[in-house]
Image (spheres, helix red, strand yellow):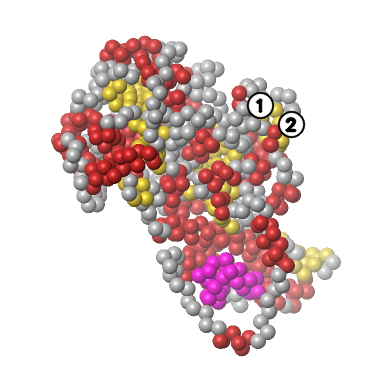
Amino acid sequence: MEALQQNFLDSDQWEKTYGEAYEAWRTERWIASSTVTRKFLAHLLPLGKATGEKRLMPHQAEALQRVIYSFEHANISPLLVTLATGTGKTVVIASVMAWLTCRENIAKTFLLLCPNTIVRDRLQRDFSGLEVFKEFGLFPPEHTYKLKQLSCSIVEDFQNCTNLLGKKIIVSNRHQFQRGYSGGNDHLIFLQNEGGKLAVFNDEAHNTRGKEYARSLSILRQQTQFRLDVTATPDRTDNLRPQSHEIYNLSVVQAITGRYKTSTMLLASGQPPLVKDVVVQRPAPKKLELMQAQELSFYDANTQKSFTVREIDWDDWPKQKSLQLVMDPGGMKLQLMLAHEALQKKQRLAQNKYKPLLFVIAPSIAGAHKAVEMMKADFKLNPLLVVGEIEDKELSNEDKKKLREKAANIGHPDSPYDSVVSVYMLREGWDVPQVSVMCLLRGFGSPLFAHQVLGRGLRLIRNSDGTVVERSLQELTVIDHPCLQLDNLWADIDALILEGYETIREREIPRDGSELADIAERERREEQVVIRPELQKLLQIPSPVDIGGITTERLLELLEDCLAIFKEQQFEDVIIVGTAGNNIERLRPQRTKEVVAKPFKVSAMPQDDFNKDRELEQKRFTSALMKWANDYSERYPQFVTCCDEVYRIILRGFETHIFKGQAVTEVSTPELFGAHNVMPQLKETVTYEMNHRIYTEEVLISE
């Protein structure tokens, strides 16, 4: 039976209706609530700064308080909390369970339902041994005895219902309580007869609008005294939302920037970001022209029929079971090449603190197999292939379990895999924080599916001791392609777009062609020349004023720090080959026994210049260095009055890291020549690092 039609509130409507009263209740330290509730909240949310143990984060505390207020004072039910992937939905669920346990007499049984066995496996790690309650100290001292009385059962396939007797918490894949699945009806009957009053928790609650799922919830409605839905994506492709009142909504953008609500009256600023930054990288236009890949195409592995990306309806084609789309080899190789380069950079930056992973999203099982073949043959990667639906009947239960275990443990240092390739199986519940690069070999039609996939890489990376690694490493690089036309998606989540060495917000990129006109106009402008330099003394240029952003001194410090990345570059030794042709003496790199980083290439050098004029080579080098400094003075406003200082810092970086402590006047001509030739590549690397660090600091100091 379908639920009775009801108008359910969204978070904005909830705040308009209850926000003021809720805020008074919260700021008065819950004085209108029962003694049990006040003591419970005072334990979890003490005044002052608590140290020495894990505590709820501000957004989790806000969600918990809104749940309690809505149930005790607003008398509305069921409730929906929307939290971006990676922001700790499980802790909120456990906190509510702890509160209900302290309250007593509200529910005899807690039923926690999830959409698939991957999510269930994750929940099992938190609830089977009651670890989440212990880790966060969710029970006040006077109620710790109730924690000892809790017990949990994880439902795997059909099992003897006597195993569920007396269990306070039942965690299950939703299919195990749906008619039509093996044992599903028996489990429902057991709950009706033995479950007593129920508190139902729906994880990934957008699935509750499925026909059979909704039927099960309807059957249990009379017993259900409390229901909490949690999801990161409440909006489905069919425009059906969970049938519950949304009392809190924390979006992906708020999670990334740290600007999220911790009360109805305050949009918090300066909170720590809750998930990784998303940086989208696309093939450079010149590279697309070189590979003739401007128009991305796919083919059906069964019929060999070709499709352009514009001919594919990404929502409709999965319904055609016989259609096995595969990206054309040229486009696939380009995408995987960029992904491999990004992964190598992440591995260097990680410095063995954790194991960065590459996650490849393929359009079909055939496409996934082709990707795996190319990753092994061309890039020497060792990917784990995870394809098919989670309820695939072609796999035995044992095979499914082994596959899930491999996928769950892929981020462990001992795992043999450095990447994973999937189609649909890893779109919900699979949370491996070490995913640092995501490669798209398909487009998205549904924003829901896109957000689910991106969510697999948003969770913050932690060290082995559980602490969060530094913010500069918390970045998910997504390898996109212009032909996939995902601009709206990136604008929706406020992603950064990396093109060349420049980073810009997607929403700030003009899409009406005006940027091309601006470029043409700049190219038409003649270079300005100073005719009377003595008059420059009359121009008083004020020092930059700190308006709450990054100061000039701090930006100079960041530049010096970024130049230390030179140490990570490994150069091949440059020698002079003893033969010459057409008056050209060639510099050729000498390969050492082991070269980890990709070596820089050098080109030919005129023999006359090499033999006769070292001073000329030094002038070329210092001229290029000054051009770099001038470019930075135009790029970063804080450097406009200190171009000479920028020049000195960059030169010091070369002398310290590239010339091994020698001054530029002391190094040999081949060394100058090599440094001059690799300067554009080094500049691109340093600029990328600068932009990333500037963005990170601006987020931290923004209001």
Taking the view exactly as shown, the residue that stands out farthest to the bottom is 534
- Residue 306 is marked as 2
Q: Which residues lie in the magenta part?
A: 621-647
Q: Alpha carbon of mark 1 to alpha carbon of mark 2: how far?
A: 11 Å
462 left or right of 680 in image: left
Which residue is found at the position 32% from the left and 33% from the top?
Answer: 93
Which residue is at a point 74% across and 46% down the rendered structure image? 291
Give residue 412's position: percent from left, percent from top.
44, 38
Using residue 407 as the reference point, say whether residue 659 is left or right of it. right
Give the residue type at disc 1: Gln
Q: Is residue 167 visible?
A: no
Image location (x, y in percent) of residue 250: 40, 42
Q: How many marks?
A: 2
Q: Residues within 10 Å of mark 2 (few under 14, many from 20)?
A: some
Look at 53% across and 30% down and name the residue there. 237
User: Looking at the rendered structure, which numbered label has been put on residue 304?
Assistant: none
Mark 1 or mark 2, earlier in chain: 2
Name the one closer to the observer, 533 or 54: 533
Within 10 Å of disc 1 (Cα), the crowding (few <14, some 14-19, many 20+) is: many
Specify whether residue 640 is painted magenta: yes
Along the line of sight, the residue nearer the viewer: 540 or 44: 540
Q: Nearer the viewer, residue 365 or 114?
A: 114
Residue 578 as seen in the image, left or right of residue 479: right
Residue plotted at (71% across, 36% down): 308
Residue at numbered disc 1: 324
